[in-house]
Amino acid sequence: MTALQARDVVRRFGGLTAVDEVDLTAEAGQITALIGPNGAGKSTLFACLAGTETVDAGRVLLDGDDVTRLSPEARAQRGIGRTFQRLAVFATLTVADNLLVGAESRRTGSLARGLLGLPSASARHDRDRVEEVIALLDLEGVRDQSAGTLSTGGQRMVELGRALCRDPRVLLLDEPASGLDTEETDRLQVVLRGLAADGMAVLLVEHDISLVLGAADVVYAMAAGRMLAHGTPEQVRSDPTVRSAYLDREPA
Ligand SMILES: Nc1ncnc2c1ncn2[C@@H]1O[C@H](COP(=O)(O)OP(=O)(O)O)[C@@H](O)[C@H]1O
Ligand SMILES: [Mg+2]
């Protein structure tokens, strides 16, 4: 079973402990959500898992292997995919070309081969993967448009598509529903459920409680750097510490 785990992870910024001895497990075949108020440490923990932040203590494990010291790229090569809280699509490239960049980045050296104009045995496979993802995310209608011309929701789908083209086994998403309308959020939820059903470990950092309660199998709740609780959405929602730290402050 694929699983991405944080074990006793600590990350400090000067005198501030943004992540304080935190444990989290994202299992294959499940959607795991990480919730908490602004400043809770969610994005910092996410970055520790993706490798864009180093940890001050603790370990990050992928399928039981210690990846704590690996670069983000090395983790990506091992199957950890991610999207960004701020959109990061190539605005002037078409949607299909954005996805192709993702598919090609699976193969180290493919970019150099491409620049030299050398044929690649796997180039066809890359294009096949792009077509699969275009179908999965329902992007046929916009495949030849510049990604920068799409709505925020459309661009988020492109970013998700680019990550999926790398065939990740673990997918990390930081606030994927931000800027999405209700219909787009519903579609994202269906897509994520499908990915989990196919065996992917999906970890969402989310502020949109409705997305989390509707889609997640397991919810982790953080506040002020600490993990307050984890369990089913219902268990976490009714947890008194979580309620006082977070949920009671949300508009009804
Ligand atoms: N690079 C950084 N330098 C200094 N402080 C940071 C940095 N990144 C995050 N923080 C601080 O760490 C805390 C947790 O931030 P963050 O992980 O972004 O929370 P969340 O994603 O839950 O809103 C906040 O107090 C934030 O100001
Ligand atoms: Mg954040």
Image: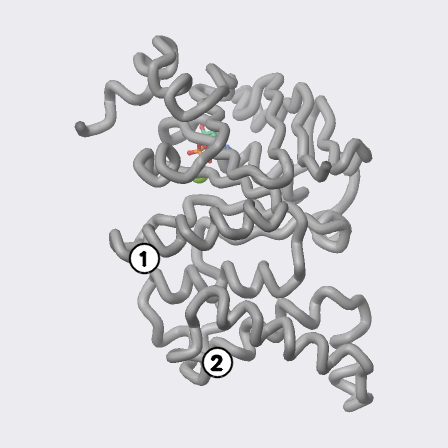
Q: In which quarter of the image is residue 207?
A: top left
Residue sitting farthest toward the top: 240
Q: Which of marks 1 and 2 is in front?
A: 1
Tag 2's secondary structure?
A: loop
Residue at the (50%, 46%) spot, across then down:
173
Residue at 75% across / 55% down in the picture? 77
Left of 86 or right of it: where is 132? Answer: right
- Please name the residue that numbered disc 1 is placed on: 184
Q: Relative to the observer, which residue lies in front, 118 or 190?
A: 190
Q: Where is residue 90 in the image (x, y as percent from the top left)?
A: 50, 72
Badge 1: residue crowd in 10 Å (few <14, some 14–19, many ≥20)? some
Q: Distance between the residues labelled 1 and 2?
A: 20 Å
The quarter of the displayed image where residue 112 is located: bottom right
Residue type of the residue flagged with mark 2: Thr
Please give the name of the residue rendered at 33% of the width and 51% of the height, measured from the top-left corner.
185
In the image shown, does 189 or 70 lie closer to the viewer? 189
Which label belongs to residue 198? Answer: none
Q: Are marks 1 and 2 in contact (CB under 8 Å)?
A: no
**What percent of the width, then of the height, locates residue 52?**
64, 44
Query: In the picture, residue 201 is in which quadrant?
Result: top right
Query: In the image, is 55 to the left or to the right of 90?
Result: right
Horizontal and vertical percent position of residue 137: 46, 65
The residue lying furthest to the left in this view is 252
Q: In the image, is residue 29 above or below residue 232? A: below
Sequence-first disc among 1 and 2: 2
Amino acid at the residue labelled 1: Glu
Residue named by callout 2: 94
Looking at the rendered structure, the secondary structure element under dot 1 is: helix
Up-down relation of residue 207 to residue 250 (above or below): below
